[in-house]
Each structure stands twice: as structure tokens, then as C-alpha cells.
Image (spheres, rainbow, N blue to C red):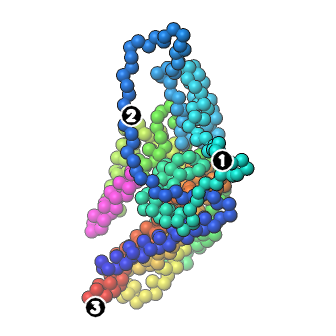
Amino acid sequence: MRSYILKRIIRTLVTLFIFETLIFFFIMAIPGSDFRILPPQPKTPKPVVVQAPVAENTQAPVGEVKNEEPPATCKVDVQLPKWLPEEDKAKYLEDANRELILQGCPTGEEAAQSTVPEPPQVSEQQPAGEVYVAPTESVLQQYFYYLQNLIRGDLGVSSSRRMKVVDVLTELGPRTLILILPGAIIGFFLGMRLGVSIAWKRGGVQEMGSTVAGVSLFTAFPPFLSFLLATIFAIQLNWLPRENIIDPGLWLGTGMQPNQVILWMLISILIDSILIYGLWRSTRWVMKRRRLLRGAGSALVLVFTAAWWIGNGYGPFLWDILRHLVLPLTTLILLTFGTTMLLMRASMADVLQDAHVTTAKAKGLPDSQVSSKHVARLAMIPVVSRFILELPLVIISSFAIERVFFWNGLGQYLFQATNESDYMLVLGILTVVGIVILAAHFFVDMLNLVLDPRLRKATTSAKGE
């Protein structure tokens, strides 16, 4: 068992190394890609600044001009909120500059220009007619620099956003995660549940309608489905917002950050999932009113979570994000649901022909027990494996959905970084996507080890030999 797990870990790490090597050399081979990997920089502690005491006598001598400092209430470093949409940035900066002018401070443009690094000047000692060329290392040397930086957790600096790629990923990652995780998990379980139902009761209207719907969603083009839902529910019916992640008018002046609320949303989803899963596992042996007990317990967990959000004052901000999340999340759920349902239906049809299913029915076991324990448990193994293999398509679909709904996540900025030739940010996003996919493959290997007794028996016998 341990050797099996160790082999899977080594295989995952080797695959990650090969993946990083391929995407690095692919980007380096792009015509016109002139980005350069810098050698690892030593981490130096920040210098401690000691302020000298201010003299009491501030009167300037006769004949000298006293430098006028901005008022103490000035906030010269005017910074735009990272979550603010593009169309609202100009208005926000104009209001901030007007307030600074009233305080006697420099404007936001002047403060921003002072922070922009100036281009390198040509040395006066350089002979006339010669062009200065910065020293560059070979591609192989930069590749070793890249691996060293990757191990240290340094993915370089984004040229378009002028900040570290790690900071960009930390800012945008939760927004994409809140879309991918619920969308993929909810779509998977709904498709698996319906696939079991229509495979067990074949030949009815439910099977025909579900199959047609599954084929339609399986072949649907993600941007087209996104535009269709947006046209119906946002433009025609005006039930939901069309785009963006939040309503800026609700958030300005409150001091709240969308990433903070999204992070608490992810933590709440994780805690609720653990509690509900523990409730369902602990009530497996309850024979009477088990569904009622599970439903009441799950509802109680959700009520306590909602009370916590309302009690902390996060309720309006949570509701605003959820309203904007409904359309992109529904699109991703429908895309995942159709594929999973068709695969589960086909896998169930194959397992139903096995001899152990006939034996279980001959013993007089209830249909629910035969369906859940003897058929669905084996049928879901290839479905889970196939779902993880198609996880890159799910992530690509979520990126396309972000682009359509202007959901400011990794997908939205991946398109912008590609258009602006910000190859360091592209490389960082692809690195995160590759790590997530490989981690999902490793998780499936461990899940198959738990679900499939034949695999456990094979690993145990191999260890005994």
C-alpha cells in the first residue's frame, strides 16, 4: 500500500517537472517573446527606518525659503481598488483627486507618475552611434533560474500589472476557485445521481428527456451557452446582473474587499460540507426516517451558517456576490452535468450485466441497496476517472465563462495577459492550472484505492510477494 502511494507521488512530481519544462520552452519559442528570467534574489530583511525627532522651532531663517509639506491628513498614495471594474476606475480616481486638491495635496496622477520607474538612460560615456544591449543569459541558464525560482515560490513579476505574479494569483485565485469548485462538484453529483436513476429505470419518459438534455449540454459550446443564459435571465427578464463580480456602488466607502468575502465563502462551504458529510455517514445505520433526519440536520447546518453571515454584517456583500455568481455558476454546472450523466448511465448499464448483481437480486435485497452498494459504487469508478481526465476542459470552460461574464478571475486575466504579451503571468497561471490538475489525478488514484476492493487486494498481494 505504501509503495503504491509512494509511486504515485513520484509520478506526480515527475509529470509536474516535465509539464513545467514544456510550457517554459514553448513560451520561450514564441516569436517576439523577449522576457527574461532573472537569477534568484536573496531575501534581505526590510531596513528599519528610524525617524529623527522634529525640532520645535520650525521658523525658517531670513533669506531662506521654507519647503511647504503637504498637510498631515494627505493621502498622496492614491490607489485604485483591485476589484474595481475598468469602467468605474476613471470616476473613482477623479473623486479621489478632487478630495486631495481640497486638502492641498498632489493629485493621484502625480503620485502615480512618481512610482512608475523611468526607462534606463544611456550613459554619457557610451560612444556615439552604439546601441546599449543588456547582458542576457542563454535559454538553458534562464531555465535553471526558472526552476530555482519556482522551488522558492517566486514566479517573477507581471509586466502588465507591475506586481509579483504570486500576488496576482493570490488576488485572482479565490475568484476562480469559487466558480470552479462548486460548479464542478455540484454538476458531478447531480449528473451521477440522475445517471443512476435513469439507468436503473430504463425505458421511461425520464430516460428519454434526460438523454436528450444530456447530449445537448455535452455538445454545447460554453460561450454560446453563457450568452444564451445571459440573454434570457439578465437582458430579457432582468432577474440577474449581466456581468462583473460585484456592484461597485454597494462596496465603495465600506472598506470591504471582495476577496475577503469570497475567502469566507470558501471556508463556509468547506465547513458545511464536512459537517453534512459527517451527518450522512453517521446516519447510515438509521433505518427509520433516515431521509428526514438527514434533511433536518443539513437544513440546521445551513441555518447556522446563514445566521453567522447575517450577524457579522456580511450578508449584503455575500448576497451581491451570489447574485453575480448565479449565471456563470449555472453555466458551468450544466456543462459538467451533461457529461457526467451520460457517462454514469453507460457505466451503470455495463455493471448491471455482471453476475454479482443477479446474485444480489436473488438474495432478496432491496432495490435501493442493490442500486447504491452493488452497482453504483463500481459504476462510478470509471466515471470519476474520466471526470478527472476531462478536468482541463472544465477549467478551460470556466475561463471562457469568465471572459463572457467579465468575472475578474484567472481566466479573464489570462486572456488579457496573452493580448499584452505578459508571458510571466501566462506562465504563472498555467503553472497553477497544471498543479491543480496533477493534484486532482493523485486524488483520483487514492479514491480508486478506497472505492475498488480489487485494487486494494492487488496492492496487498504484491506487497506480500
Instruction: Decide if residue 448 is on the left or right side of residue 413.
Output: left
Q: Work out whether mark 1 precedes mark 3 in sequence or the reverse, and give the earlier one.
A: 1
Q: What stretch is highlighted in magenta?
A: 267-288
Q: Residue 373 versus residue 175: which sits nearer the camera?
A: 175
SS under mark 1: loop
Q: Residue 218 versus residue 123: which sits nearer the camera?
A: 123
Which residue is tagged 3?
465
SS under mark 2: loop
**Residue 311, image x, y percentages:** 37, 38
Q: Work out whether mark 3 precedes mark 2 in sequence or the reverse, and give the earlier one.
A: 2
One can see residue 459 in this view: yes
One can see residue 335 in this view: no
Q: Residue 389 versus residue 49: which sits nearer the camera?
A: 49
**Residue 455, image x, y percentages:** 36, 83
Q: Work out whether mark 1 precedes mark 2 in sequence or the reverse, and give the earlier one.
A: 2
Specify the farthest residue to the right.
129
Label for residue 126?
A: 1
**Residue 453, image x, y percentages:** 34, 81
Q: Quadrant of residue 82?
A: top right
Q: How many labels does the image show?
A: 3
Label for residue 49?
A: 2
Residue that appears at 35% across and 54% down: 271
